[in-house]
Amino acid sequence: MNDYLQVVTTVQSKEDARRIADRLVEKRLAACVQIAGPITSVYRWRGKVESADEWQLSAKTRSALYEAVEREIRAGHPYEVPEIVGLPIVAASADYLAWIGEETVGE
């Protein structure tokens, strides 16, 4: 199952989230992107504690596509230092993983 990832990022608006999600799925870099929000993030930035309402994206993809997914997210991301984290899918149904494999393209 290490062949599959969930790639997580956050953005400042629902519109940004939808734009990135659409591109990832249209380019077949992700089989599915779920958008959740708004969420509240509390973080340290340039020596200060900040908080912001954000939208979180969770993209289901294959591990081999991580670099391409990261490039695509960065290309459309409004943040100077975006969160882009690939989490291995350690357990999932075989048919769901097969679907991810079928709906994404090789790099």
Image: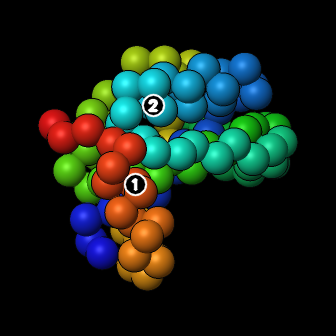
| Residue for point 76% across, 27% down | 14
Reply above or below: 49 against 25: below
The secondary element bearing badge 2 is classed as helix
Q: Nearer the viewer, residue 101 or 42?
A: 101
Residue 104 visible: yes
| Residue for point 53% across, 45% down | 32
Most distant residue in the left direction: 107
Q: Answer left or right for 76 relative to 33.
A: left
Indicate the amino acid at tag 2. Leu
- The image shows residue 47 at horizontal and vertical percentages of 60, 41
Residue labelled with disc 2? 24
Most distant residue in the bottom direction: 91
Check the picture and name the quadrant holding the N terminus. Answer: bottom left
Reply above or below: 15 against 60: above
| Residue for point 45% across, 25% down | 26
Indicate the amino acid at tag 1. Ile
- The image shows residue 61 at horizontal and vertical percentages of 38, 51
Residue labelled with disc 1? 100
